[in-house]
């Protein structure tokens, strides 16, 4: 069974540029998460989807971040415009149930110059 | 106050040593508990769930103390391959909260 797939693995952009990350969760996993992880810190939730509905986006900086999960499968996380402080690893995770085991993708490492 | 607090370490131990990690959580209504392992520049992966009765998986033992709101992980007979960051994770029923992670290096 394929795991959670994310792309791109690495992205380097200049500040004020836009960037988008894509995630394909494990087949059959209804719950999808986007996390942000800074060096030396644990993952922090940005947004959680149950199927196509964003059920928790309270930690998503909505002035510059947006996300969508069309058809309840793949998801895209966008940042526009990017700031220096956005440099981090963006992790996508999925689970079969909201309280079940989280399966993470390899992450997208963003560097903003 | 953070939902989950861990000692970040680092813990540097010789091969064969026993090492223990603790973490505390703030929400008494938390429902499920986990230890995840994260290797350098890799994604977190589930190491083990933590049950109230305590549970063991080979050299790894996890304990939960609901009254004191802390979770522990004990690693016996440490191997070089155990070197990683160990993340304490708590689920409140609708959200997972991660600790900062405890870094372990096992030295030959």
Image (tube, coloured by chain):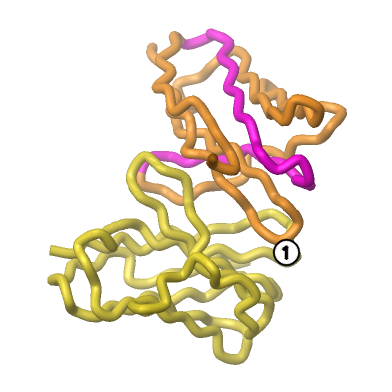
Chain colours: A yellow, B orange
Image quadrant of residue B33? Answer: top right
Q: Position of residue A54 (x, y in %)?
A: 60, 79
Image quadrant of residue A53? Answer: bottom right
Let me know if residue B33 is in the magenta part: yes
Q: Numbered disc 1: what chain?
A: A
Element marked by disc 1? loop
Q: Position of residue A64 (x, y in %)?
A: 33, 77
* Quarter of the N terminus of chain B within the rendering: top right
Q: Residue furthest right?
A: B53
Q: Is residue B53 above or below residue A27?
A: above
Q: Residue at x 75, y 36 (%)?
A: B50
Nearer to me, A98 or A58: A58
Q: Residue at x 60, y 49 (%)?
A: B97
Residue B56 visible here: no
Nearer to me, B57 or B3: B3
Let me know if residue A44 is in the magenta part: no
Q: Is residue B73 above or below residue A11?
A: above
Residue pointed to by mark 1: A98
Q: Residue furthest bottom?
A: A71
Q: Which residues are magenta?
A: B15-40
Q: Residue at x 71, y 61 (%)?
A: B94
Q: Is residue B3 above or below residue A67?
A: above
Packing grade of label 1 (10 A; few <14, some 14-19, many >=20) is many
> In this image, B68 relative to B6: left or right?
right
Q: Position of residue B10 (x, y in %)?
A: 39, 22
Residue B3 visible here: yes
* Quarter of the C terminus of chain B within the rendering: top left
Q: Is residue B58 above or below residue A3?
A: above
Q: Position of residue A104 (x, y in %)?
A: 53, 58
Q: Residue at x 72, y 30 (%)?
A: B69
Nearer to me, A102 or A52: A52
> In this image, A82 relative to B47: left or right?
left
């Amino acid at each position: 069974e394929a795991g959670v797939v994310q792309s791109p693995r690495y992205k380097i952009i200049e500040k004020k540029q836009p960037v988008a990350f894509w995630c394909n969760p494990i087949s059959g996993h209804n719950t999808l998460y986007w996390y942000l992880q800074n060096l030396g810190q644990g993952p922090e939730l940005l947004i959680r989807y149950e199927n196509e509905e964003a059920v928790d986006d309270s930690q998503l900086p909505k002035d510059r971040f947006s996300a969508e999960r069309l058809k309840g499968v793949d998801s895209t996380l966008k940042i526009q415009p990017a700031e220096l402080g956005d440099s981090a690893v963006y992790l996508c995770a999925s689970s079969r149930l909201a309280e079940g085991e989280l399966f993470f993708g390899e992450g997208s490492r963003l560097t903003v110059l | 106050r953070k939902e989950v607090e861990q000692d970040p370490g680092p813990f540097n131990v010789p091969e064969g040593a026993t090492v223990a990690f603790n973490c505390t959580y703030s929400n008494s209504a938390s429902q499920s508990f986990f230890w995840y392992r994260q290797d350098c520049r890799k994604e977190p992966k589930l190491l083990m769930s933590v049950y109230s009765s305590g549970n063991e998986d080979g050299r790894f033992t996890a304990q939960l103390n609901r009254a004191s709101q802390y979770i522990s992980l004990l690693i016996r007979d440490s191997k070089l391959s155990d070197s990683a960051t160990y993340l304490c994770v708590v689920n409140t029923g609708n959200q997972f909260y991660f600790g900062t992670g405890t870094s372990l290096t096992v030295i030959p």
